[in-house]
Amino acid sequence: MAKGRKSIPSVFDIWYLIFGIRCLIFGVLTLFFMKIDIITIFPEMLDGFLGHSMMKRAAEAGHVEFNSIQLRDFATDKHRKTDDRPFGGGPGMLMKPEPMFKAVESVRTASSRVLLMCPQGIPFKQARAQELSTEEHLIFICGHYEGIDERIRQELVDEDISIGDYVLTNGVLSAAVVIDSIVRLLPDVLGGEGATDSESFSVSLLEGPQYTRPANFQGLDTPSVLLSGDHAAIAAWRREQAEKWTADRRPDLTIFPEV
Ligand SMILES: C[S@@+](CC[C@H](N)C(=O)[O-])C[C@H]1O[C@@H](n2cnc3c(N)ncnc32)[C@H](O)[C@@H]1O
């Protein structure tokens, strides 16, 4: 190359530069950002939940993006049918595979985790909420009617989740429960409003009793240690109360961690 002459970047140089910048932006975004898709035939049930309080603030602050997906938009017939009778007979209707496959495939990427809400699923726990809060993209499948065609679970679902030993009408409420528990654990979502590491279940303990003003209410006193200003004594009292409550109410949790 002649001295002083500037080299002209080739098409490959430019392509690599653009590719590098895109990777960088994507990497930075995915460090702090979660995407949540919720597939249901009742997306409007989610409006109140997603449009208020912590979920709304988390989305507005850019920590999470919610996307409610109307399953009927992926039905192929003119009635936008998403259910059919179960083979072999029996009561109720099942969700058909075709619309669900199309709906999931419309949003799924290599980094997606597909979660099916169902009573037969693995019981949901705080520890699982913590693990799921590190995922980039969650897709929730909300069942309805009698449930889903089994091939949906077989082919599309990474894990199935139950929120308890009872049966709800559809999966929107159970998905909302799981989403709430995950989103509040995302970095910076709670801000100064709550310390999630001392909450119930975070350390195999229930949180103990708490008090706020007034110190005396209708003759009921706040334990004096909480007014003492002695932080070590307060921490010891809280720990003692947490262990007592856990032993009384949830003995199944009593594998107390060391302090
Ligand atoms: C009426 S339930 C189906 C119950 C199903 N026939 C059975 O006996 O297990 C309809 C939908 O509600 C949701 N659902 C109900 N109970 C749930 C639970 N305990 N946990 C998670 N999702 C639940 C699921 O999405 C389910 O597909």
Image: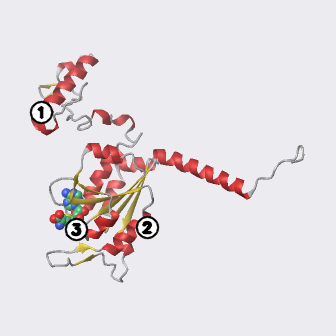
Query: Percent from the top left, x then y, of residue 180?
Result: 31, 49
Q: Which of marks 3 and 1 is nearer the N terminus?
A: 3
> Measuring 39% from the left and 42% from the top, which residue is drawn there?
189
Q: What residue type is labelled 3?
A: Gly
Alpha carbon of mark 3 to alpha carbon of mark 1: how far? 37 Å
* Residue closer to the observer: 2 or 149: 2
Picture quadrant where residue 208 is located? top left
- Residue 151 can be seen, yes or no: yes
Q: Which colour scheme is used?
A: secondary structure
> Measuring 35% from the left and 54% from the top, which residue is drawn there?
50
Q: How crowded is mark 2: few (under 14 residues within 10 Å), some or many (20 or more)?
A: few
Q: What residue type is labelled 1?
A: Ala
Mark on residue 247?
1
Q: Which residue lies most toward the left here? A: 248
219 vs 85, left or right, is left
Q: What residue type is labelled 2?
A: Ser
Q: Where's ligand 1: which quadrant? A: bottom left
Query: Percent from the top left, x then y, of residue 93?
Result: 21, 75
* Residue closer to the observer: 66 or 253: 253
Return the residue at label 3: 147
Q: Tell whether label 2 touches label 1 (CB within 8 Å).
A: no
148 vs 183, left or right, is left
Return the residue at label 2: 106
Picture quadrant where residue 19 is located? bottom right
Quadrant in the picture for the C terminus? top left
For disc 3, does the CB lie below 8 Å from ligand 1? yes
For disc 1, does the CB lie below 8 Å from ligand 1? no
Query: Percent from the top left, x then y, of residue 129?
Result: 30, 46
> Measuring 32% from the left and 61% from the top, which residue is drawn there?
157
Q: Which of marks 2 and 3 is nearer the N terminus?
A: 2
- Residue 170 can be seen, yes or no: no
